[in-house]
Image: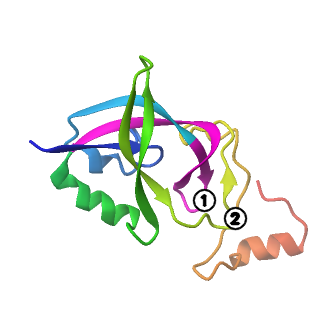
Amino acid sequence: MNTVQIIAYGTLMTGEGNHRYCQNAVSIQPCTIMGTIYDTGWGFPAFRPEGSNTVHAELIEIPIADWPAMDRLEGYPRLYDRMLVPATLEDGSTVEAWVYVMNIIPPQAKVIPSGSWKHREGDRQRFPRQDRTGKKCDRERAASKKNIRKE
């Protein structure tokens, strides 16, 4: 079977919403990569290889036949591109694997200082709800006009 190694740093990771795309995985192991991870405010993260932060991820080996479905999920090549980067495994060894890199980081995105999508809750800053045009939703707009802090 032909396989490919990808690096998951967000919703493709074990226990996350899109992990079902990895149901045929041959292996999954923790790893780290260098760069910056962002909370886009849209329910999924973005990664850029710039920076010297440690990003916590998983190295996932999948059948190459499953790769097109992941490409569609990630919006490749318009929203995300693929890039080969070094991943460091728990034993200290390094392998090259493919990671999805967001082409343009949205202006509302916030850096996740911990480098972990799964443990971002302590890092999160509130995002106002937005409709598809980027405008605040009515409830949030009304609350902000009244200077009421939403919890």
Q: Which residue has dot 1 on it?
A: 40
> Disc 2 designates what residue?
108
The Cα–Cα distance between marks 2 and 1, rounded to whole angstroms, is 7 Å
CB atoms of marks 2 and 1 within 8 Å: yes
Q: Is residue 39 magenta?
A: yes
Q: Quick one: 25 or 19, which is closer to the camera? A: 25
Residue 7: x and y in percent read 39, 42
Q: Main secondary structure of the magenta part?
A: strand
> Pointer 1: residues within 10 angstroms few (<14), some, or many (20+)?
some
Residue at the left extreme, as displayed:
1
Disc 2 crowd, CA 10 A, few/some/many (<14, 14-19, 20+): few
Number of marks in the rendered image: 2
Q: Give residue 60's position: percent from left, percent from top.
A: 31, 38
- Residues shaded magenta: 35-62
Amino acid on which disc 2 is placed:
Gln
Q: Residue at x 29, y 48 (%)?
A: 20
Which circle's residue, 2 or 1, is located before the other in the chain? 1
Q: Identify the residue shown where x is 62% and y is 83%.
A: 133
Q: Quadrant of residue 121?
A: top right
> Is 46 displayed left or right of 75 in the figure?
right
**In the image, what residue occupies the spot 71% across and 65% down?**
128
Q: Residue at x 55, y 42 (%)?
A: 117
* SS at mark 1 in the image: loop
Q: Is residue 72 left or right of residue 88?
A: left
| Amino acid type of the residue tagged 1 in the rendering | Thr
> Measured from the top left, where is residue 32 in percent x and y?
49, 32
